[in-house]
Amino acid sequence: MTSPSQLFELSPLPGASFGGVVRFKSGMGARAATAALEQAPDALANALYASGGFLFLPLMDEIFDEPRLLVRLSRLFGPEVENNLVTFTAENKTLFNIHEDVPEILLVTNAPPINNQPMTRPEPPLTPDGKFPTRFPQRRGWHSDQSFRRPPPDFSLFIAVQPTPKGQGQTLFADGAAAYAALPENLKRRIQGVEALHTLPSNGRSEKAVRSGVQPKVLLPHQRSQKQSMVRIHPVTGKPSIYMCESGQLDWVDGPIVGLSPGPDGEGAKLVYELMSHMTQDQFVYAHDWTKGDLVIYDNRNLLHAPSWYEADKYIRIMWRTTVMGNPGPEYAGEERSWIPQPVG
């Protein structure tokens, strides 16, 4: 059997305290690399765990001509790659579109008819020392993919089909394990066993919607906000991480923190701001500036990420994403999927 060292070189991710760069040997492109990895199915996942939950694979352009390669790569990380035609019901479909030939691929784009617009530009656009802002609340949009589901997904694979020019449209990643390890002991004790209330976006329960007086939508049973532990133990590495989102994917009507006073000015909100400000400090964050063909693989169980602003009136950005499920951890054992309508009777 082929060994990982024969397939690729793994090096540290430049400019980050976590993550790895995978460069395939013998000039292999995505087709040959995928076939070789299928003969050593644990190699890439083991590299990811060794790299803190994040891998960057450059020069994966062959996927554009053969999109199912992205699904085959995704299956190296778990038993199920989400088929969006099955799981995205009419009531919970978000602002994505589904690839016309490969239903496991979501299109994340501002192109019509999807028109998924970027985050607003941070205000001010730079930090006081002139740097690219990463820290909440100056930088908004921090989340873990589909944290409003129980069980939530394990991995996402994200590839740049048509990125924006350098310096715009970056994706930021934050290391929840390192951020947890750096918490003061009193704050670790304070959040142990505490749950946040995560919600489907665009239902009138975000911090912005609540502050604006938007009437929250009546949620169907499979859309209801879901409790998630704020300290999540990774089922493979055993490391604890802060598992959080911020203003757009938490329920600021009934939450955001279970058991604390609700609303944007309650005690729960103060705790969210404290944790998110801590977790998104520079030492825990990596900003990926996309080149066409870049593929990143990230572990939603211990990383957060955030999109960033770009000039959507000038540029069309097209990204493809797959979602891998299968090992959320023992706390979810035996649960029905919260987001799938259950039969009546």
Image: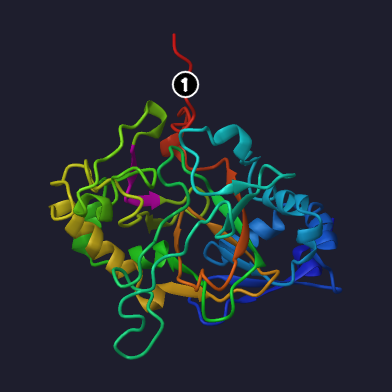
Q: Is residue 168 left or right of residue 148?
A: right
Would you identify the image quadrant in which residue 226 lies? top left
Q: Is residue 149 above or below residue 119?
A: above
Give the colour scheme of this rendering.
rainbow
Whether residue 35 appears in magenta in the rendering, the answer is no
Q: Out of 185 and 84, give the one closest to the viewer.
A: 84
Name the quadrant of the N terminus.
Answer: bottom right
Location of residue 339 in the rendering, given as x and y in whole percent from the top left corner = 46, 33
Q: Is residue 2 left or right of residue 296?
A: right
Q: Which residues are magenta?
A: 225-232
Residue for badge 1 = 342
Location of residue 29 in the rendering, given as x and y in whole percent from the top left corner = 82, 67
Location of residue 253 in the rendering, given as x and y in whole percent from the top left corner = 22, 43
Q: Residue at x 31, y 80 (%)?
A: 124
Q: Main secondary structure of the magenta part?
A: strand
Amino acid type at mark 1: Gln
Q: Residue at x 28, y 45 (%)?
A: 205
